[in-house]
Image (cartoon, rainbow, N blue to C red):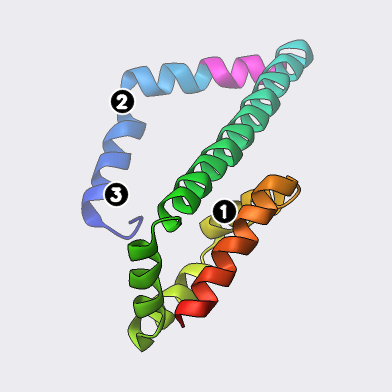
Amino acid sequence: MMESKEWKKKMKALTNDKGFKENAKKLQDKMADPNEQAQMQAKMEHMVKQGQADLKNDAKDTMAQAMQAMADPQTMADAARMMKDPNFQQQLQQMASDPSFKKYVEAMQDMMQDPSKKAQMDRMADSFKSQL
C-alpha cells in the first residue's frame, strides 16, 4: 500500500494541508508539556486496553457462533468434507500463521476455561472426528 503512487500522492497532499500542519504543531506543543503528555498517554493506554477487550469479546462471539453452527449435523458433514480437500488444508495453514488469527486462538483458550463450553467443544470435536 505504501508503495502505491496514489497513496504517496495523498500523503503528500495531506502533509501540505494547512489544517494538518496546524494540528501537528498543536500536538507538538502539547507533547512539550509533561502534564499534557501524561494525560495523553493515559488516554492512549485506556484506548488500547479497551480496544483489546473489544477484540477479545468479538473473537469470543465469533467462536460461539461457529460452535453453534457446528451443532448442525449437515454443517459438520460439510466441514469434514472440506477438511479432506488439500487446497482447504493449505488455506487453513496460511490462516493459522496470520497474526490476526491469534486473537481467535486466545478466545478459544478463554472459552475452554468454562466447563460447559469445554464439554460442548469436546462433543463437537468427537462428532467431527467420527465424520472423518
Horizontal side of residue 74 vs 123, given as left or right: left
Q: Could you say whether the residue bearing mark 1 is in a helix, strand or loop?
A: helix
Query: Pointer 1 and pointer 3: residues touching (CB < 8 Å)?
Result: no
Which of marks 3 and 1 precedes in the sequence? 3
Going 50% across and 72% down the picture, which residue do you hit? 128
Image height of 95 relative to 15, above or below: below
Q: Where is mark 1, residue-wise? A: 104
Going 78% across and 16% down the picture, which residue do you hit? 34
Going 34% across and 84% down the picture, which residue do you hit? 87
CA distance separating discs 2 and 1: 40 Å
Given the image, on which type of amino acid does mark 2 rest? Asp
Occupied quadrant, residue 90: bottom left
Given the image, on which type of amino acid does mark 3 rest? Lys
Which of marks 2 and 3 precedes in the sequence? 3
Q: What span is colored magenta in the figure? A: 26-32
Which residue is at the far left?
6
Secondary structure mostly seen in the magenta stretch: helix
Image height of 1 relative to 23, above or below: below
Horizontal side of residue 89 vs 16, given as left or right: right
CA distance separating discs 3 and 2: 14 Å
On the image, the x and y values in percent for residue 108 come to 63, 53
Numbered tag placed on residue 17 in the rendering: 2
On the image, the x and y values in percent for residue 112 come to 71, 52
Q: Where is mark 3, residue-wise? A: 8
